[in-house]
Amino acid sequence: MAVTVGELLSGAAGRLRDSGSETARLDAEVLLADTLRTERTRLIASPEAQVDGAAAERFTAAVDRRVAGEPVAYIRGIKEFFGLAFATDARALIPRPETECLVEAGREEVMDRLAAAARRRGIDPGAPSDGPIRIADIGTGSGAVAVALAVVLRRMKVIAGADVTILATDDSPDALELARENAAGHAAAEGMRFVDADLLPPVLPDSGAPLDIVLANLPYVRSDAIDGLPIAASFEPRQALDGGPDGLDVIRRLLALLPDVLAPDGVALLEIGADQGSAAPAAVAQELPGWTATDEMDLAGLPRILRVARGARPA
C-alpha cells in the first residue's frame, strides 16, 4: 500500500524524536532520500508524492536502526567530508566536520613548501631537487584525511608520486581496507601507501627517508567521557575514540616518535579536542623540550590543530 512522503517523514520524525534524536526531522529526511535515491530538497518540495510499499518498508527498517542509536552514516554507508563522499561502516570512525581543518592545514603546508621550492629553483636553476614532499596520515581510519588531501592537491595540479607521497597507517587491518576502498573510489591511490602499523612502521618507506609533514587525527577523548557521548558513538570502534585519562595518551606516543621520523624542517599537525588548547602544548613541552607547539583554531574559534616543530617557528 502506497503512502506519501509527508506521512512517512512525519511518522519517522516522531519515532526518532521519542528515541532521543536531536535531529529527528533531518535524520528522517536523509534516510528517506537515501532510500528513494533522490535529494532531500525534492522530498521537502513534494510531500504529497507517493511511495510504494517496498520502499516504505526499506525506509522503516532504516528508521528502526536509527531509533536503536546507529549513526545515519553507517545506515547509509556513506558520509560527506570535505565535499567528497566516503564509504563508512563499523570498521572505522565516522569522519567529523571539524577534521576538515586538518586537511586544510595539510594543504596549506604542502602548497607553502612547493612555492618555496619553486622560488629556490628560480634563484638557482641548478639546485638539486628536494624530491617529493613526504606526508604521513597516522591513524588514517577510513582514509578521509589522506584521500581528501590527495584529491584537493590533484585539483591544484600537484602530481602524486612526483611532488608528494602520502603514507597512511593504521593498526586496524579492517580500517586500512576501508581506506584503500575510499582511495580507489576517488582514484587517489597513486602515490599513496597503506601500512598496517601502530602509529608508524619500524622503518619508513623510501629506505627510511624522514617525513616532511605528519598529519594525525588520533583518539583524544578522555576515557571517562566516552560513556557520556551520544549513543551513536557506541557503534564506532572505541579504540578510535579513547585517548586515555586526559585524552592525550596516544598523542604523547606519537610525539615521542617525532624526533626520529620528522625531517629537520618538518612539521606535525595533530587534531586535538577543543578543551585541550593548554594541555596539548604542555604535553609537547614535556615530551619534546625545545620544540614549539602552537594551536590553530577552527571556524568556531576553538583550538583544533596542534602544530609541532623543532625549534622556533619560522616567521
Image (cartoon, grey):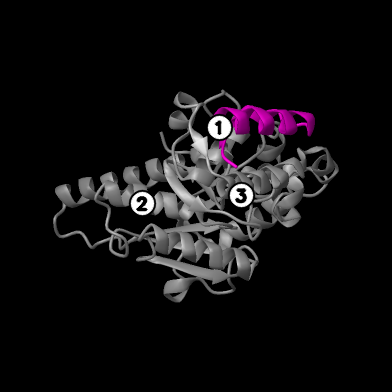
| Amino acid carrying mark 3 in the image | Arg
Up-down relation of residue 263 to residue 228 (above or below): below
- At 39% from the left and 65% from the top, the residue drawn is 189
Asked whether the beta carbons under mark 2 and mark 1 sit within 8 Å of each other, the answer is no
- The x and y percentages for residue 168 are 51, 62
The residues colored magenta run: 1-26
How far separated are the C-alphas under marks 1 and 3?
14 Å
| Quadrant housing the C terminus | top left
Up-down relation of residue 185 to residue 226 (above or below): below
Looking at marks 2 and 3 on the same chain, the residue that comes earlier in the sequence is marked by 3
- At 43% from the left and 38% from the top, the residue drawn is 314
How far separated are the C-alphas under marks 2 and 1?
40 Å
Asked if residue 98 is among those painted magenta in the image, a careful observer would answer no
| Amino acid carrying mark 1 in the image | Thr
- The x and y percentages for residue 127 are 20, 59
Asked whether the beta carbons under mark 2 and mark 3 sit within 8 Å of each other, the answer is no
Q: Which residue is mark 2?
A: 151
- Numbered mark located on residue 4 in the image: 1
